[in-house]
C-alpha cells in the first residue's frame, strides 16, 4: 500500500512540476526544494523547467534586483536547487530523469531540449556539469496534462476555485 501511495504521490508531484508557475505555487515549490527526501529526478526536472540559463546571465541576486526585479523569486529558486543538488542535499534516486528529454507530458516535443543554450543570452556563469547528467531509475510515464490545472487534478482545482469564489478569496 505504501508503494502505491508513494507512486501516486510522485505522479502528482511530477504533474505539478510539469505545470508549475512559481508565482502561483510558491509554498509547494519551496516545500519540494527544501525536502531532502524528494527524489533527485523531481528536483532535476524542476531545475530544468525553471530555465536556469536565464539565471546565468546575472552575477548574483543583487544584480537581478537591479536589472530584472520581477525575476528575483525564480532566480533564488533556481540557484538554491542548484546549490543543494551539487552539495548532495537530495539523496533519493529511484526515478529516471534525462535533462535532454524531460518527457513529463503526453505529446511532448522531444526536439525541445531544455539543456540547449539560448544563444541570445550572454551568460557570465555556467551550469554545473552534474546538472546535465542523466539519472537512472524507474521511468514515470508521461501524464495527461489535460487532467490537471496548475499541477492539481482538475476535480481538486475546481473545488478550490469554488471555495475561493464562495468566500471571496483572491
Image (spheres, grey):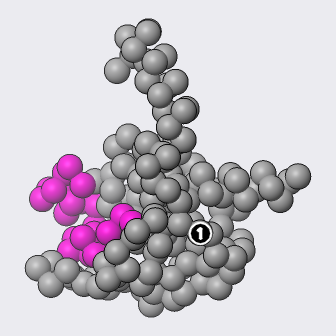
Q: Nearer the viewer, residue 131 or 80?
A: 131
Relative placement, left or right, of 13 versus 107 is right
The residue that appears at 50% across and 56% down in the rendered structure is: 144
Q: Is residue 56 magenta?
A: yes
Looking at the image, which residue sits at the far top? 167
Q: Is residue 34 visible?
A: no
Residue 27: x and y in percent read: 50, 41
The residue that appears at 45% across and 86% down in the rendered structure is: 132
Rendered position, 116 above or below 107 = below
Magenta region, mostly helix, strand or loop?
A: helix
List the residue tagged with mark 1.
141
The residue that appears at 36% across and 49% down in the rendered structure is: 21
Rendered position, 151 above or below 42 = above
Q: Is residue 89 magenta?
A: no
Relative placement, left or right, of 26 versus 116 is right
Which segment did they paint magenta?
49-71
Element carrying mark 1: loop
Relative placement, left or right, of 27 versus 57 is right
Residue 3: x and y in percent read: 83, 59
Amino acid at each position: 500500500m505504501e508503494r502505491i501511495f508513494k507512486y501516486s504521490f510522485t505522479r502528482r508531484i511530477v504533474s505539478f512540476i510539469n505545470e508549475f508557475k512559481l508565482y502561483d505555487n510558491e509554498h509547494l515549490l519551496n516545500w519540494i526544494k527544501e525536502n531532502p527526501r524528494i527524489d533527485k529526478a523531481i528536483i532535476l526536472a524542476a531545475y530544468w523547467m525553471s530555465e536556469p540559463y536565464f539565471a546565468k546571465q546575472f552575477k548574483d541576486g543583487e544584480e537581478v534586483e537591479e536589472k530584472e526585479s520581477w525575476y528575483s523569486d525564480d532566480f533564488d529558486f533556481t540557484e538554491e536547487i542548484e546549490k543543494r543538488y551539487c552539495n548532495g542535499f537530495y539523496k533519493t534516486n529511484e526515478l529516471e530523469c534525462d535533462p535532454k528529454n524531460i518527457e513529463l507530458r503526453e505529446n511532448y516535443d522531444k526536439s525541445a531540449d531544455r539543456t540547449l543554450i539560448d544563444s541570445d543570452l550572454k551568460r557570465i556563469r555556467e551550469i554545473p556539469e552534474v546538472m546535465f547528467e542523466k539519472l537512472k531509475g524507474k521511468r514515470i510515464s508521461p501524464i495527461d496534462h489535460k487532467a490537471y490545472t496548475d499541477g492539481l487534478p482538475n476535480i481538486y482545482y475546481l473545488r478550490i476555485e469554488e471555495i475561493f469564489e464562495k468566500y471571496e478569496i483572491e
